[in-house]
Amino acid sequence: MKVLAILYKGGDAAKEEPRLLGTVENKLNLREYLESQGHEYIVSDSKEGPDSDFQKHIVDAEILITTPFHPGYLTADLFEKAKNLKLCVTAGVGSDHIDLNAAVKKGVQVLEVSGSNVVSVAEHVVMSILLLVRNFVPAHEMIERGDWQVSDIARNAFDLEGKVVGTIGAGRIGYRVLQRLVPFDCKELLYYDYAPLPEAAARAINARRVQDLEDFVSQCDVVTVNCPLHEGTRGLVNADLLKHFKKGAWLVNTARGAICDKDAVAEALKSGQLSGYSGDVWNVQPAPKDHVWRTAKNPLGGGNGMVPHYSGTTLDAQARYAGGTRSIIENYLTNKPQDAGNIIVGLGKYETKAYGQR
Ligand code: NAI
């Protein structure tokens, strides 16, 4: 049996740091196990175009392992070529790089290591909210430049206390973000999600649900995006919706780049409709060198907290998603039932409601 993994190249860092498991070099720690079972394990970062290893090996692979950090895009066309494919495993959380409707049609199962990096991301979101609200990045850059002009920073620095923070999507990550904000004494914690939180969970953090998206964003000082990318969320935060944001709101997106309209966000930042945009996810990954989100700024020259896609790939997270990937594959190879929370697409149907109300 052929198992194909598309991972990112770790270079020297991966040689020096063996805990960088999600790399081509360290292979999610699966090589010995798979080869000892007599399987062929192909690992590569080459994923674009007809000559890529991805397209070459997808033709006869039975299991495909991918990560959202260096996504191998499994399109409906590629599904047609993947004659042996039975199982796609996302080493991490977020399987939008797989055409899930095609997986349903083709009877290919799609599993994630649910929960493996949700704390990692929630911590990053809290950090990103603070660094935008407190105007941290320009303050640090000023120090590196050798300058010292406190008023240039303080003119756009605020406290998080007393602000309204809302999450689009209140699942594992969105809920953990709100939970972690409780001690900051925000004015209110809001959420927008078609699935209401269980009453006790909402009460525990005093979160209020707002059912209309425009109404929701108009009440928030900070909006954080924590829903999966699917037909219903692609381009959800666009020029029209941004008009309904409070003037000068902060927006944090660690969910998926394509949930926010690239140019509309850059324009809103430039005009000051947004005071800041921060996150680690991009509509194409790796992001091109001239991607507007790399350098977009607010009118005062700050408000950009963008980083490469790494919030969910801390070393702690890598240990969890590598271990979870192995469990999924072991279950598959030994015909054991999978953990229900990991199944996105089961045999011929969606098993989760998180990728759109189905
Ligand atoms: P989850 O499945 O626990 O929660 C997702 C929530 O979003 C659900 O409550 C669902 O009802 C809601 N939702 C779906 N469509 C919606 C819509 N149209 N409007 C409002 N809410 C909607 O997923 P989890 O673990 O919280 O992860 C969420 C997403 O975060 C992942 O799908 C992935 O895209 C992203 N992620 C990013 C990482 C990173 O490194 N930046 C790492 C892990 C996840």
Image (tube, rainbow, N blue to C red):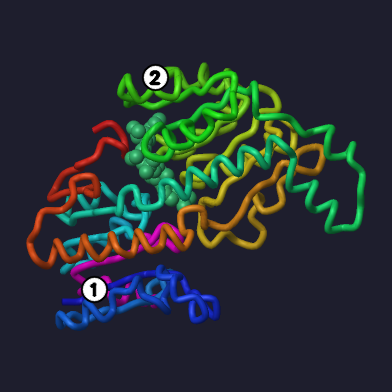
**Mark 1 lies on residue:** 3
Q: Position of residue 299 (x, y in %)?
A: 80, 37
CB atoms of marks 2 and 1 within 8 Å? no
Task: Describe residue 330's horizontal placement relative to residue 210 as left or right.
Answer: left
The magenta stretch is 51-73
Task: Describe residue 44's horizontal placement relative to residue 38 as left or right.
Answer: right
Instruction: Say if 65 sits above or below 103 in the image.
Output: below
Task: Describe residue 345's horizontal placement relative to residue 245 as left or right.
Answer: left
Q: Position of residue 17 (x, y in %)?
A: 50, 75
Residue 249 belongs to the span the image colors magenta = no
Mark 2 neighbour class, 10 Å CA radius: few under 14, some 14 to 19, many 20 or more: few
Residue ranking furthest to the left: 335
Which residue type does callout 2 highlight? Arg
Q: Residue at x 37, y 39 (%)?
A: 172
Q: Residue at x 67, y 53 (%)?
A: 294
Image quadrant where residue 204 sits: top left
Q: Position of residue 324 (x, y in %)?
A: 28, 59
Which residue type does callout 1 highlight? Val
Q: Is residue 12 visible?
A: yes
Instruction: Say if 229 sits above or below 107 in the image.
Output: above
Residue sitting nearer the eye, 164 or 123: 123
Task: Report helix, strand or loop for mark 2.
Answer: helix
**Mark 2 lies on residue:** 203
Image quadrant where residue 53 sits: bottom left
Residue sitting nearer the eye, 127 or 95: 127
